[in-house]
Image: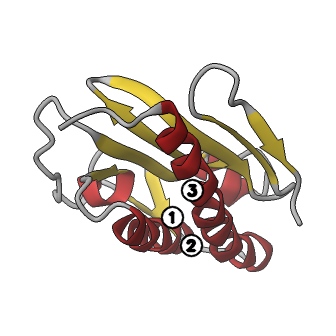
Amino acid sequence: MSRFTPAERVDLLAALCPIARAASAVIMPYYHQGVVARTKADRSPVSDADEAAEQVILAGLAQLTPDIPVIAEEEVAAGRIPAIGGGRFWLVDPLDGTKEFLKGVPEFTVNIALVEDRLPVLGVVLIPPTGQLYGGAGPGTAMTENAT
């Protein structure tokens, strides 16, 4: 498996932004209406918002890059861990900051990154309450977007 070229990474980054925004759109109704948390085996909280956002991201990544495995927080918590070897994979935390989210504190994010040869090579971080998105795919590619 060859690494993505810098241009391919920039294209992937552009395609990743709508996936993160779609996950954010799923999260925010739960934030405004409230949601009940459950406790995972590691004693961390999880909610329907975490799981719904992760499903949106998994579906988007499956369309974007069907051959790249995904290590996603809630899938891993459920015991579904794909074999990645030392290769390329997506790393997903669909709702980072679940404790703050559950308390109504607007300090949580959607995080999606691509890892190649054990190094992160591109990713996005989106703040759902503000719609602010940050991303990068290597030197000179840092970007930010406001909600549209």
* Residue 93 versus residue 79 in the image, above or below: above
- Give the residue pinned by disc 1: 50
> How much space separates mark 3 and mark 2, taking CA atoms?
29 Å
Considering the image in quadrants, where does the C terminus appear? bottom right
| Residue type pointed to by label 3 | Leu
Q: Position of residue 74 (x, y in %)?
A: 35, 58
The structure residue drawn at horizontal position 80% and vertical position 74%, both measured from the top left corner, is 32
Marker disc for residue 36:
2
The structure residue drawn at horizontal position 76% and vertical position 37%, both measured from the top left corner, is 143
Tell whether 41 sits left or right of 37: left
Marker disc for residue 16:
3
- Mark 2 or mark 1: whose residue is earlier in sequence: 2
Instruction: Name the image colouring.
Output: secondary structure
> How much space separates mark 3 and mark 1, taking CA atoms?
18 Å
Q: Nearer the viewer, residue 103 or 135?
A: 135
The structure residue drawn at horizontal position 15% and vertical position 41%, both measured from the top left corner, is 84
Q: Nearer the viewer, residue 31 or 15?
A: 15
Considering the image in quadrants, where does the N terminus appear? top left
Label 3 crowd bin: few (<14), some (14–19), many (20+), radius 10 Å:
many
Tell whether 53 sits left or right of 109: left
Marker disc for residue 87:
none
The structure residue drawn at horizontal position 33% and vertical position 55%, both measured from the top left corner, is 40
* Residue 70 versus residue 123 in the image, above or below: below
Q: Are marks 3 and 1 in contact (CB under 8 Å)?
A: no
The local secondary structure at tag 2 comes to loop
Q: Is residue 144 visible?
A: yes
Q: Position of residue 39 (x, y in %)?
A: 39, 58
| Residue type pointed to by label 1 | Asp
The local secondary structure at tag 3 comes to helix
